[in-house]
Image: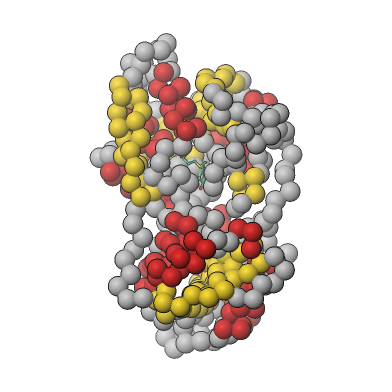
Amino acid sequence: MTHPDPDHGGSRADVSTPAPADRPAPAASGGPDQTDRVILRTAADEQGLSGPGPVLVLDDVTGELTAAALAEHAEAAADGSAPVISWAGSDATTDALRRRFRDEIAAGRLQIPGGDRPIPVADVAVSARPHLALMRLPKALADLEHRCRDLAGAGEVTLVAGGRVKHMTRSQNEVLARVFAEVHASRGLGKSRALVASSPREHIEPAATATGIARVRVRGQERDLAVRGIGGVFGGASADAGSLLLLEALDRSLPGATGPAGEPDAATTISAIDLGSGNGLLTAYLAAALPAARVLASDDDADAVASTRATLAANGLARESIAVTWDASLSRVADGTADLVVLNPPFHAGTAIDATLVHGLLDAAARVLRPGGQLWFVHNSYLRYRPEVEQRVGPVRQQARDRRFTVLSATRA
Ligand SMILES: C[S@@+](CC[C@H](N)C(=O)[O-])C[C@H]1O[C@@H](n2cnc3c(N)ncnc32)[C@H](O)[C@@H]1O
């Protein structure tokens, strides 16, 4: 997930109505799309969906790969375990899959790993030993590499990964070839195609965690914060320019900085939330700048949750009063309990720009803030969010602005 090109479109864009999305709602039952169909046809051409172990479906946003695997691979494994496992890195997708396939789960035909905490794909692969894995090609190569290396622990597994041809590159084949001895492309179906990878190489190491450093001001003092990026987390281990602008402005507003003093000071116990914590840079800042605060970092993405934990650990900032949760839109946080929410929201659904993704996150922030609590929010300067934030949260002040990004604060009415 990345910010749209700030130079894209000179005039301010309307963000109040949904843009047509190029991908379906999570686990929607609108039937398989073309990418689902090419994945399923390729799997049938290769070996069929039945086989010695379960079929492992990864990140099934339409739910259709799971439905097809359930229809065609019904036999339980010899040890009685489910013939189909559907794993998603997104908490929202996991939930949607659980709701759609309630009966199949109850009948023991489908397993959906992960509850309050995400279960790493590597653990699922090692314990379930699937013979076939199905997925869409993720947008980020680091994400693909992470998934492949995790899968390699399954032993003899064939991976069928499909995507839109316009988003496919040679680099994806190269990533697959680093992990699997055999890689080839399928016949195309319309504008989609699949890559098939089999025979995992021996001694494949887990994907490396990306490391980086971000220089920020904490209570006015320059400090280098270590950043960690796992899999396809937004920004990898680098600091997003929008996040840095937000932190600069937020730090100026805190006592001890060079700017005007405000609330809260370092000794005050407040409850602060990093909504959509990604690699955890904002969380690490909150942990360092507000040592007495209760801090919650929350993200829908399993890689982000792991990255945020790794970033806190790398800075020696993990403490009992800091929690990192896998949760979509703060669904497990009580209303009116937070004093501060920081938010650098996503503007992409897969490869498509969707400026309305922010709405659900603004509503979540408004719900969890106590009256008088503050949201600090960064967005692309060419998008016009002020009216949205004002309407959903409360009175807004512009705290910083440069050519690319604008930082707003809003006080919960
Ligand atoms: C633009 S990134 C920002 C990450 C990080 N805060 C930073 O500043 O670099 C947005 C993050 O929001 C997460 N996200 C998207 N939708 C979400 C939702 N409904 N609930 C929680 N997190 C979400 C994404 O997984 C991603 O990590």
Q: Position of residue 157 (x, y in %)?
A: 45, 79
The residue depicted at 51 percent of the width and 28 percent of the height is: 376
Callout count: 0
In the rendered view, how is the structure colored? secondary structure
Q: Position of residue 260 (x, y in %)?
A: 42, 11
The residue depicted at 65 percent of the width and 40 percent of the height is: 355
Point out the image quarter for the C terminus: top right
Q: Is residue 39 above or below residue 114?
A: below
Q: Position of residue 309 (x, y in %)?
A: 35, 47
The image quarter in which residue 122 lies: bottom left
Q: Is residue 406 above or below residue 16?
A: above
The image quarter in which residue 405 lies: top right
The residue depicted at 45 percent of the width and 68 percent of the height is: 176
- In screen coordinates, is 335 left or right of 215? right
User: Residue 245 versus residue 5: which sits nearer the camera?
Assistant: 5
Q: Residue furthest top?
A: 260
The residue depicted at 30 percent of the width and 21 percent of the height is: 221
Q: Is residue 292 above or below residue 131?
A: above
Q: Residue furthest front?
A: 170
Residue 77 in view, yes or no: yes
Q: Position of residue 367 (x, y in %)?
A: 57, 35
Residue 309 in view, yes or no: no
User: Residue 60 versus residue 295: which sits nearer the camera?
Assistant: 60
User: Residue 315 versus residue 362: which sits nearer the camera?
Assistant: 315
